[in-house]
Image (tube, rainbow, N blue to C red):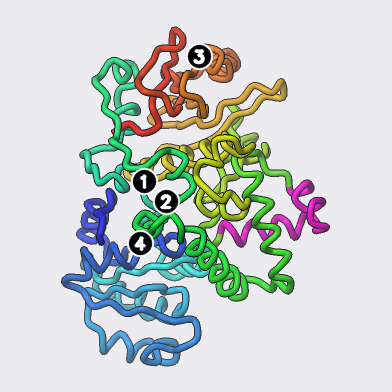
Amino acid sequence: MYIKRILTDKLFKLTESFPVVVISGARQVGKSTLLQNTLGKTAEIVVFDPVIDIENARQDPELFLNNHPTPLILDEIQYAPELLASIKRRIDKNRSPGQYILTGSQQWGVMKSMSESLAGRAVFLDLEGFCLLEINENYSKRPWIARWLDSPDTFPDQSQSRLTQKITIYEQLWRGFLPEPQFLPTEVIPDFLTAYQRTYIERDVRLLAEVSDLQLFSRFLRLVSALTAQEINYSQLGRELGLTPQTARRWLDILKATFQWFEIPAYSGNLLKRVSNKPKGFIADTGLACLTQAISTPKTIGGHPLWGALFETAVAAELRKQINFLSPRPNIYHWRAYSGAEVDIILEYNGVLYPIEIKSKTNPSRRDTMGISAFRKRHLRLSIARGLVIAPCSGVLQLSEHDYAVPWDLI
């Protein structure tokens, strides 16, 4: 079953304007499916393999491209990086749009090679797991985050609608947001995610880095999943497993390189301090987090110590997916003062800062806006929009003079 992606129109626009489009994302997020159901109707698709040299593409890239006229889709291009130099030469001779569409599931393999070989010739599109609009097959023209950024003052007064959820919030977090688990029976979800984890570790980790102890790396994955939605402390990660901070950082880079982990940098009014403060880290998919923490059923999440962190992880990932719809994309940060006051998400767009708190409660209160208020007091000279508290609540609710609670499943 194919579910339309909200980035489909953007994909078509990019292929109409650029000679090379690169789609990157984790395994099983639907890159191949998206292309098969859109551009694959008019373009040939070649899928590369880490072991087999498909049609001698690595040995003789020129001959391979001679036998595959454009438009051409090259799936998992990180397994045939030798093609990039040949593609570059052909693009330099003919810059007509929509010639090559490349996909990859490793940032180290794709982004590094692309930035070196196709600089100024390729445009990138990030594809992640399903967002809530896609899961519920509701294709509004613009995600709600775009409407808020357009008009933060009037947004709370506008008529807002919620998605009609097919399953409970606990089950959604437990299933995660990869496409395939959305269609599987509940009893086999752990089997799918276990296979996903094993395939990822045994295949990608071996290809990307010299990790001699895969069992220890699996424990590392369980540890970072338990620390999702927290500031990253490499020394703490290392102590827990007997690793050096340098090894912990390298292993976390592997998770980022394969799109299993993402980070949000810290915000500071001083641009230099934005990169010196600790970033906040998140496991990319809540379903994988539930698996690594041995959460056996959706109902268990409600009483689990990680319930709040899992909800924040899901909302942070949802915001990233909606932001990918925008062009240009807002900058995204988190903020934490030494006093302990914090704001989970801060979007920077057109010179305005948009603070967001994430609370896993159905009845948020004024108290939940304290972090946003502290942020405003610390940055009186900055333009700060009305703040939002995103929660599993039933509707839009004014919490303070400047801040509102909104449901996490707005259309």
Residue at image location 37% in from the left, 50% down from the top: 130
Give the secondary structure at mark 4. Answer: loop
Which of the numbered marks, if any, corresponds to residue 30?
A: 4
Residues tagged 1 and 2 counted as in contact (Cβ below 8 A): yes
Along the viewing direction, whichever of 340 and 328 lies nearer the viewer: 340
Secondary structure, magenta segment, majority class: helix
> Residue farthest to the left?
42
Residue 398 picture quarter: top left
Residue at image location 24% in from the left, 20% down from the top: 159
Q: Is residue 20 visible?
A: yes
Q: Position of residue 136 (x, y in %)?
A: 29, 44
- Disc 2 target residue: 177
Residues tagged 4 and 2 counted as in contact (Cβ below 8 A): no
> Disc 4 versus disc 1: distance between alpha carbons?
12 Å
- Disc 1 target residue: 131
Residue 150 picture quarter: top left
Q: Is residue 265 left or right of residue 126?
A: right
Question: What span is in magenta?
Answer: 234-256
Residues tagged 3 and 4 counted as in contact (Cβ below 8 A): no
> Disc 3 versus disc 1: distance between alpha carbons?
27 Å
